[in-house]
Image (cartoon, rainbow, N blue to C red):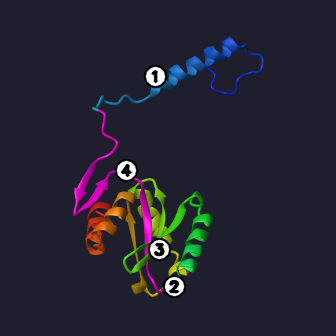
């Protein structure tokens, strides 16, 4: 079968026949894979009062001491998102938690994307150099766990959960 461009003088039935041949060749050349049971798209379990859901969307959160100027950090992160391909659409929202202001970045499709985003953003020294390291904390977290964190008010336990579930 011809796999190059279709010649202008071909009739539509000749084109259809050629496409069928190409598709049949592609199908014949596919590696065969053993049949397996369908796998559930997500696994959900509760650990330390928080929920781990495999493949759940996550958020990158910056917890800033209330005395830190949140607007300059927010602007810097928005600029970072715009300047990095595909990140300009990440929504950045503000919230509060205990003695912290929160910048919630997301949503990120899964743990690998969230970890990659966290790594790239934390490497941007221009964002973080003006803030004492003791004035902020960062984490990746699901929407459900943001609610649980606020209800439980136990950041230390969440950080243990995050380390165990997302950075193992």
Q: Mark 1 and mark 3: span between their CA atoms?
A: 47 Å
CB contact under 8 Å: marks 2 and 3: no
| Nearer to the camera, 131 or 8 | 131
Q: Which residue is mark 3?
A: 122
Looking at the rendered image, the quarter that the C terminus falls into is bottom left
Q: Residue at x 22, y 64 (%)?
A: 48
Q: Position of residue 115 (x, y in %)?
A: 41, 63
Name the residue beneath numbered marker 4.
55
Examine the rendered structure and indicate whether residue 90 appears above or below residue 136.
above
Verify CB contact (< 8 Å) between mark 4 and mark 2. Answer: no
Q: Which residues are magenta?
A: 38-67
Distance from disc 4 to disc 2, alpha carbons, whole Å, reads 33 Å
Q: Residues within 10 Å of mark 2 (few under 14, many from 20)?
A: few
- The residue that label 2 is drawn on is 129
SS label for mark 4: loop
Mark found first going from the N terminus, 3 or 4: 4
| Among the 4 quarters of the image, the one containing residue 159 | bottom left
**Is residue 70 covered in magenta?**
no
Mark 1 and mark 4 in contact (Cβ < 8 Å)? no
Q: Which residue is mark 1?
A: 28
Magenta span includes 54: yes
Proximity of marks 1 and 2: CB atoms separated by less than 8 Å: no
| Mark 1 or mark 2, earlier in chain | 1
User: Pointer 1: residues within 10 angstroms few (<14), some, or many (20+)?
Assistant: few
Compare marks 4 and 1 and give the one earlier in the sequence: 1
Seen as rendered, the residue at the extreme right is: 9
Distance Cα–Cα, label 1 vs label 2:
57 Å
């Amino acid at each position: 079968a011809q796999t190059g461009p279709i010649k202008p003088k071909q009739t539509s039935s000749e084109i259809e026949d050629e496409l069928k041949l190409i598709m049949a060749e592609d199908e014949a050349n596919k590696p065969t894979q053993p049949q397996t049971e369908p796998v559930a798209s997500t696994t959900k379990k509760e650990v330390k009062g928080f929920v781990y859901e495999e493949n759940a969307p996550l958020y990158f959160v910056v917890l800033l001491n209330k005395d830190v100027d949140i607007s300059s950090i927010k602007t810097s992160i928005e600029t970072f998102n715009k300047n990095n391909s595909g990140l300009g659409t990440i929504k950045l929202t503000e919230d509060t938690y205990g003695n912290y202001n929160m910048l919630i970045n997301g949503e990120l499709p899964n743990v690998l994307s969230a970890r990659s985003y966290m790594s790239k953003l934390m490497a941007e020294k221009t964002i973080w150099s003006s803030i004492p390291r003791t004035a902020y904390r960062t984490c990746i977290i699901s929407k459900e766990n943001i609610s649980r964190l606020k209800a439980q008010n136990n950041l230390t336990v969440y950080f243990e959960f995050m380390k165990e579930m997302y950075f193992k």
